[in-house]
Every structure is written in C-alpha cells, then in structure tokens.
Image (spheres, rainbow, N blue to C red):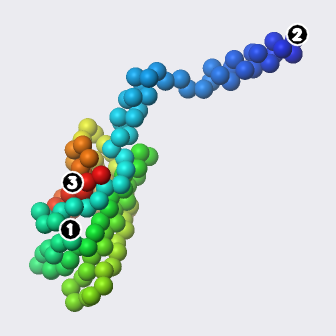
Amino acid sequence: MKKLTIFALTIFIVLASIPYFSSAENQQIKQDTAFAGVYTLVTVNGEKVPATISHDDVKFKVSSGTFIIMANGTCISKMSFIPPGASEAVSNEVSATYKKDGSKLTMQWKGAGTTEGILDGNSFSMDNAGMKLVYKK
C-alpha cells in the first residue's frame, strides 16, 4: 500500500509539473507565432521578381528571394541575383535576430546593422538599404 501511495504521489507531482494551457492560452500562442514561416520575394522596388533594378547606380537582376522567420527570434534572408556583366545567378544568405512589436519586426543582422520590416497578414515588407522588398507567405 505504501508503494502504491508513493507511486500515485509521484505521478501527481509529474503531471502537476507539466505546463497546462487553456485553449485560450494555446490560441494566443498560435497567434503570437502565426507570422513565422517562409516568405517568397514577389517585388523589389515595385517590380515583379525576376526584376532588373538599379541600386546605388548599379543595374542587376534579382532572380528570386526568400525570407524565413522562425518563432525562436531568428530569421534568414536568401536572395539570388545576377551581377552586372555576369550570366549566372549568385546567392547571398544573411541571418539576423529580431524583436517583434505588434506588426513591426526589427532585425539585427549578423555582422551588420538593423532593418525594420512590417508584417501584414501573409505579407512581409522591408526597406533594406534603399531596396523596397515585398514577400508573400
């Protein structure tokens, strides 16, 4: 009987230590992380991708891009572009940590500065060094 009581008490303690969230709390957690995911670059400076744009008086073609926002506070930007005089695309990948405040995402890029972006439903947009980038989930 003593072993059964100890076993039951142990089970109770273990179950009591498991975090319990009401369905409202679960819904709030889902809403707080619903923005996370993979966003595909759709326009650069208002031009549909693939787009030939001018940046700092240099023309180049943006072939594609993705912006991955993870719920853990990190994000990754990947872009493929064709530099002036080249015929093949090169890829660039950079990562950042971010802070979310409402619909605003403030990204601190690894080895670089900060950029602010806006989340709007399934869209994400940012002005990165004068390039206006719009992504769709």
Identify the residue at image location x=13%, y=75%.
54
User: Counting other residues with Cα less than 10 Å from the Cα at mark 3, is it few (<14), some (14-19), or many (20 or more)?
Assistant: many
Query: Which label sits in the foreground, 3 or 1?
Result: 1
Q: Is residue 97 left or right of residue 7?
A: left
User: Counting other residues with Cα less than 10 Å from the Cα at mark 2, is it few (<14), some (14-19), or many (20 or more)?
Assistant: few
Q: Amino acid at mark 1?
A: Val
- Any mark on residue 125, and which? 3
State if disc 2 and disc 1 touch (CB < 8 Å).
no
Q: Amino acid at mark 3?
A: Ser
Q: Position of residue 125 (x, y in %)?
A: 21, 54
Asked which quadrant contains residue 38, the reply is bottom left
Q: Amino acid at mark 2?
A: Met
Judging by the rendered image, the residue that carries numbered circle 1 is: 49
Judging by the rendered image, the residue that carries numbered circle 2 is: 1
- Tag 3 or tag 2, which sits nearer the N-term? 2
Query: Which label sits in the foreground, 1 or 2?
Result: 1
Along the line of sight, the residue nearer the viewer: 5 or 74: 5
Q: Is residue 125 left or right of residue 14?
A: left
- Tag 1 or tag 3, which sits nearer the N-term? 1
Identify the residue at image location x=31%, y=80%.
89
Mark 2 and mark 3: Cα distance apart in space: 64 Å
- Numbered disc total: 3
User: Counting other residues with Cα less than 10 Å from the Cα at mark 1, is it few (<14), some (14-19), or many (20 or more)?
Assistant: some
Query: Element type at marker 3?
Result: strand
Asked which quadrant contains residue 40, the reply is bottom left
